[in-house]
Image (cartoon, helix red, strand yellow):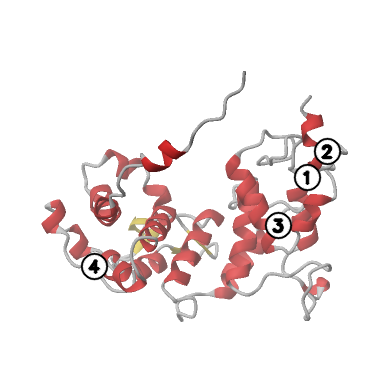
Amino acid sequence: MATTKDTTADATSIGPFYDALHTNYVTTLGDKLDSPSSYEGAVTEHLRMSGVYWSLGALSLLRDATEVDKLMGLTTSPSSSSATTGSNISSERPAIVDWVFACYDARTGGFGGNCSGTVTGDSSSSPCPHDGHLLYTLSALQILAMADALEDERLDKEAIVKFVSSLQNEDGSFSGDEWGEVDTRFSYCALSCLALLGRLPLPKWADVEVKTDEKNAIIDIHKAVDYIISCRNFDGGFGCVPGAESHAGQVFCCIGALSIAHSLHLLNEGNPNTGSNFNDRGADLL
């Protein structure tokens, strides 16, 4: 016999929220990962740009913008964290915004996930950025948006727009970088980047006063949307490519991309891969 679970006890038994500990974890993580002896720092070096964005996003839920800037060194170099970590690495770290620009890969026009070492043959001490990638280009732009720095003269918007548009494939999908991996995450990143820069062309059905000139559009938004819809599965989820298993991360990216592209209404027009509507997904699973 089915029983109804009493959730009252669960609601009142939730433990305390450790605000100070969460804040300390986020603000000291950078020093720990930058330590020469940190294994975690070494194996996550390539995705540091996204890690910084996630950290800023998490801390922004706990502190106001002024405190986040002071604690993380978003626009100015942070104060030494030796009092909490026994390290003075933070005192040597540039402002996050300056570091973001150091990760700009001028060769591709996108941002890399980190920068390290120096350019071969370069007598200066300037860092060498990792190869540009859509994932880290979006994280970089999100960081700059949080710092109100999207109008910084160092930001080459046209080069970034060209980088993003160059990665769209004939079927509407996007590769993450020049090496060609395709994933619906990259569709989300591409549309998000262009939206942040104010350069996203809108589909013909978008309810806006100024319509996009399709002949001169920087990407084919209709193909981009069609590709995302083609990755929808019978269970109501989305995969990274057509036919791939559903994954919550892909669902977030695909729904987010469709929303940015003013195309959420297409979710109600049936699944092209099964001929069914999302409302009938229960029957599809039987």
**Label 3, on which residue?**
258
Q: Label 2, label 4: how many angstroms apart (C-alpha)?
A: 52 Å
In the image, what residue type sits under mark 1? Ser
Q: Which SS class for mark 4?
A: loop
Q: Is the Cβ of the residue at disc 1 closer than 8 Å to that at disc 3?
A: no
Q: Label 3, label 4: how many angstroms apart (C-alpha)?
A: 38 Å
In the image, what residue type sits under mark 2? Asn
Q: How many marks?
A: 4
Sequence-first disc among 1 and 4 = 4
Specify the quadrant that holds the C terminus: top right
**Label 4, on which residue?**
78
Residue at 24 percent of width and 48 percent of height: 32
| Of residues 23 and 131, the one drawn nearer to the viewer in this rendering | 23
In the image, what residue type sits under mark 4? Pro
Specify the quadrant that holds the N terminus: top right
Q: Which SS class for mark 1?
A: helix
Q: Label 2, label 3: how many angstroms apart (C-alpha)?
A: 18 Å
The location of residue 71, given as percent across then percent down, is 26, 65
**Quick check: can you spot residue 117?**
yes
- 1 vs 3, front mark: 3
Residue at 60 percent of width and 52 percent of height: 178
The location of residue 93, given as percent across then percent down, is 25, 63
What crowding class fits label 4: few (fewer than 14 Cα within 10 Å), some (14-19), or many (20 or more)? many
Label for residue 230?
A: 1
Sequence-first disc among 1 and 2 = 1
Please tell me in which quadrant of the rendered image residue 83 appears. bottom left
Label for residue 273?
A: 2
Q: Is residue 40 left or right of residue 265?
A: left
Please tell me in which quadrant of the rendered image residue 193 appears. bottom right
Q: Label 1, label 3: how many angstroms apart (C-alpha)?
A: 12 Å
